[in-house]
Structure formats: C-alpha cells, structure tokens
Amino acid sequence: MKKSRPIRKKVTILLLGVVSLGSFLGGVIADRLLVMRTNTPQPLAQIIPLNRPELGIRYRMIPKETALLNNVPAGAYLVEVVVGGSAKEAGLLQGDIILKIDGTQLDDEKESTLADLLNTHTVGDGIDVTYYREGETKTMTITLKESQ
C-alpha cells in the first residue's frame, strides 16, 4: 500500500507594494507587504505582516560632536517611550540614551545603528541594552515585542 503524500504546488507571489508604513524620524519602515498570488485558480491579493521586533521607542541619534559639547555620551536619545512597548515595560525612560545593544556600540556612520542591530533579532529575543541616565551607565535585558 502506497503512502499518500501532500500535494505541493508552486505558488508565484508578486510583490505589489508596501501597505502600511510607520514613520520613523524622517524615514519609513514597512510593517506589512501587499502580495498577489498569480498562478492560483483565482488570483488572491493578501496582506502579510512582517513580524518585526521593536522596542517601542522614538529616538534621535546624538552624534559624537554634540555629545562632547553637552557632556553626555553619543547614542540614541529617547524622545518617546511608548506605553505597552518593550522598553517601557523594562523601565527605560524618556531622556535615557541607549549606548549599546548586546555589547555593540551604536554608531550612525557604520552598520551598527539601532535599527540595524534590532533587525538581527526576532520577536521574543532578549537583548542587553546599555543606557545612560543622569550620569550613570546601566545595562538591562529587554524582551523584544512585535511591532504594532
């Protein structure tokens, strides 16, 4: 007696565009894609969430020159910490400056921006965040949530 195998069909997916964009300090980050399956009996348009991890913050990078002039470290200055976000639940506050993610110093001129470092993780990952607050540097572990 032969074992039955599931039928597997190739499905061609055509990317139609980005459906929803989150504004992020002058740039945009896609959180959903609109795709169309073209070789199915009835073509189907579908929105696919990208399941990106996020901290739930808005920030501005403090360049080294500005940091020196203001006697603070260079890093990601937290403009807003979103209620319900990973950062808020872990205890980060508006005005904190994120310096490192998992031991890697943030640097806007290299491929170690905050967004670059977060994109190496998935939802549910724990990351070590080193931050500066009121003259002290501390480290905490934050579990990343899915972007909303």
Image: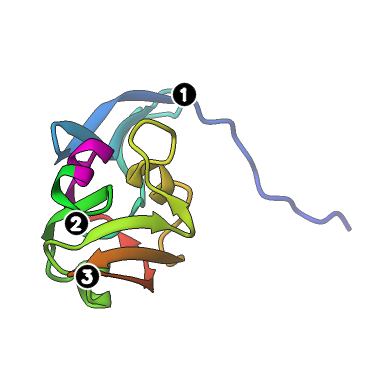
Q: CA distance from mark 1 to mark 2?
A: 41 Å
Residue 131 found in image quarter? bottom left
Mark 1 surroundings: few (<14), some (14-19) or many (≥20) residues within 10 A? some
Q: Which residue is the site of mark 3?
A: 92
For the point 12% across and 69% down, the residue is 83
Report the side of 72 relative to 131 (left or right).
left
For residue 131, above or below residue 107: below
Amino acid type for the residue under numbered disc 1: Asn
Q: Closer to us: mark 2 or mark 3? A: 3
Give the mark nearer the N terminus: 2 vs 3. 2
142 relative position to 136: left or right: right
Secondary structure, mark 1, is loop
Chain part drawn in magenta: 57-68
Q: Which residue is mark 2?
A: 57
What amino acid type is highlighted by mark number 2? Ile
User: Rounded to the nearest whole Å, what is the CA distance between mark 2 and mark 3?
Assistant: 9 Å
Q: Is residue 75 shown above or below 107? A: below
Is 67 part of what is drawn in magenta? yes
Q: Name the residue beneath numbered marker 1.
A: 39
Residue 144 visible? The answer is no
Q: Nearer the viewer, mark 3 or mark 1?
A: 3
Q: Residue at x 41, y 61 (%)?
A: 123
First in sequence: mark 3 vs mark 1: 1
Disc 2 secondary structure class: strand
Q: Position of residue 65 (x, y in %)?
A: 23, 36
Looking at the image, what colour scheme do you see?
rainbow
Few, some or many residues within 10 Å of mark 3 (<14, 14–19, 20+) = many
Considering the image in quadrants, where does the C terminus appear?
bottom left
User: In whole angstroms, how far apart are the C-alphas of marks 3 and 1?
Assistant: 48 Å
Examine the image and state in which quarter residue 8 appears.
Answer: top right
At x 13% / y 31%, what residue is drawn?
Answer: 26
Name the residue nearer the viewer: 6 or 148.
148
